[in-house]
Amino acid sequence: MRILLVEDDVMLADAVTRALTQSAHAVDCARTGHEADRALATSDYDLVILDVGLPQIDGFEVLRRLRARRSTVPVLMLTVNDALEDLVTGLDLGADDYLTKPFRLSELEARVRALIRRSHASASSDLIHGRLRLDMAARRLYLDGQPVDLSLRELAVIELLLLREGKVVTKQQIIDHLYGWEDVSSSNSVEVFIHRLRKKLEDSGVPITTVRGMGYLIEKPNGAGGA
């Protein structure tokens, strides 16, 4: 998943970025309110981690502008102040969750997973499809209970396809979810990841279908509901 982290504390931002990157997320980091506002106006994200106390414009104003553009991206707000009025202000402006500094990285990661699941209407930390089970908390994929050896970006691709099962995911959507500002990306890299996943999952009974001219698809299991 692609995450925008908006935090002006360099040491904290670096620690959070490392933790999220190790969990197969692509992370862009903005240091000021204006930088965050520009990023959110021009790029799509799966989640925003937004500090309240920012240079130039504060996190509340960034959030206000984001929701004014009718964006529904989940927002986790960070603050050094646990005052009830700040909590109410953030939630009223459209924040989805709140975390007070200092916090443990494990708690931040748990809240990130919960918000991503909620945005995809999934209540469980496990994504189950036939004989596959993706443990979003442990960041591991299992086939018949046995772990499948995946790179971080292979894991990110299968997670995206499973979260959107029954829907076509375009190459550009995969690129947007895999790579941050400083990463080099191409459609060829997506094809490589898909090829590797197909080889590793060839005995799973879960095909990754190419929809010509559109992208890739994992069909809903037989008998699954949904539109």
Image (spheres, grey):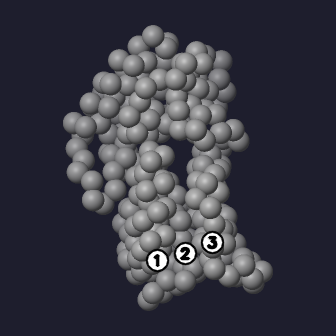
The quadrant where residue 40 appears: bottom left
* Amino acid beneath label 3: Pro
**Could you tell which of marks 1 and 3 lies nearer the N-terminus?**
1
Q: Amino acid at mark 1?
A: Asp
Give me the C-alpha separation between circle 1 and circle 3: 12 Å
In this picture, is 182 found above or below 100? Answer: above
- Tell me if mark 3 has few (under 14), some (14-19) or many (20+) residues whose alpha carbon lies within 10 angstroms of its own: few
Residue marked by disc 1: 9
Q: Is residue 59 above or below residue 50?
A: below
Q: Circle 2 — which element?
A: strand
Disc 1 is placed on an element classified as loop
- Quarter of the image for residue 171 reads top left
First along the sequence among labels 2 and 1: 1
Tell me, yes or no, whether the two marked residues, 1 and 3, touch with CB atoms within 8 Å: no
Q: Is residue 38 above or below residue 132?
A: below
| Quadrant occupied by the C terminus | top right
